[in-house]
Amino acid sequence: MNLATLITLCRILIIPFIIFLLLSIPEKTFAAFIWFLIAALTDWLDGFVARKFKQTTALGAFLDPLADKLLVLCVLVVLVELGKVSSIPVVLILIRELSVMGLRIMAANKGFSVPAEKMAKVKTVVQIAATAMLILGIPMAEIVLWLAVLLSLMSGAEYLWILKA
């Protein structure tokens, strides 16, 4: 296991801690926010390390987007549970993420590699920003989340178009 993959695994392992802070210790919302940001920043870090030190692997290429989806979706589901956000945008994002992951797995089984498109990367950044804002209870957060939904659906359509599924 290389350093880039280890960083990605750390992002996944931080998720239960963030959930614990959000659900068990309401006065620790800011701590949950900080840990969420740390986890989100590891997405950039693992990519940087993988490229800089030529540590790209098939496992890393699979785990990195999975870690992003787990981080955002798990926290959003907890925020629905806490009543901080409606379930509708979260369900729409969940449908898109699972659908695109399924399409990418089907493509991989046929020998095709489907790298992340630019819109999907922007979508991830907006999802992370919206989730962070929701953790803090920032009033404009739900508008940003709906922007993330729009980008999610558009990038999902882009993958459908690319794969002609």
Image (spheres, rainbow, N blue to C red):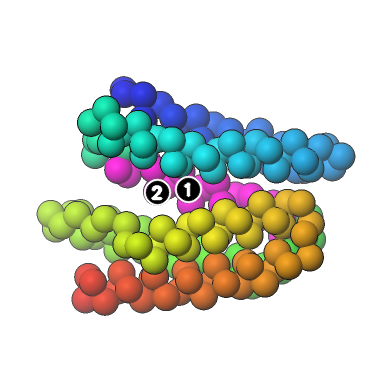
Q: Horizontal placement of 126 versus 162: left or right?
A: right
Label 2 sits on a secondary structure element that is: helix
- The quarter holding residue 32 reads top right
- The quarter holding residue 62 reads top left
Vertical placement of residue 88 versus 123, above or below: below
* Amino acid found under the numbered disc labelled 1: Asp
Vertical placement of residue 43 versus 138, above or below: above
Point 51% across, 47% down: residue: 70
Q: Horizontal placement of 120 versus 57: left or right?
A: right
Which label sits on residue 160? none
Residue contact between numbered discs 1 and 2, judged by CB atoms under 8 Å: yes
Label 1 sits on a secondary structure element that is: helix
Which label sits on residue 65? 2
Point 44% across, 29% down: residue: 7
Point 51% across, 56% down: residue: 125
Q: x and y percent of residue 104 in the render?
A: 28, 59
The secondary structure making up most of the magenta span is helix
Q: Counting other residues with Cα less than 10 Å from the Cα at mark 2, is it few (<14), some (14-19), or many (20 or more)?
A: some
In which quadrant of the rendered image does the C terminus lie?
A: bottom left
* Amino acid found under the numbered disc labelled 2: Pro
Which label sits on residue 68? 1
Q: Counting other residues with Cα less than 10 Å from the Cα at mark 1, is it few (<14), some (14-19), or many (20 or more)?
A: many
In which quadrant of the rendered image does the N terminus lie?
A: top left
In this view, the residue in front, 108 or 123, is 123
Point 79% across, 65% down: residue: 139
Q: Horizontal placement of 111 versus 73: left or right?
A: left
**Segment tinted magenta in the rendering:** 61-80
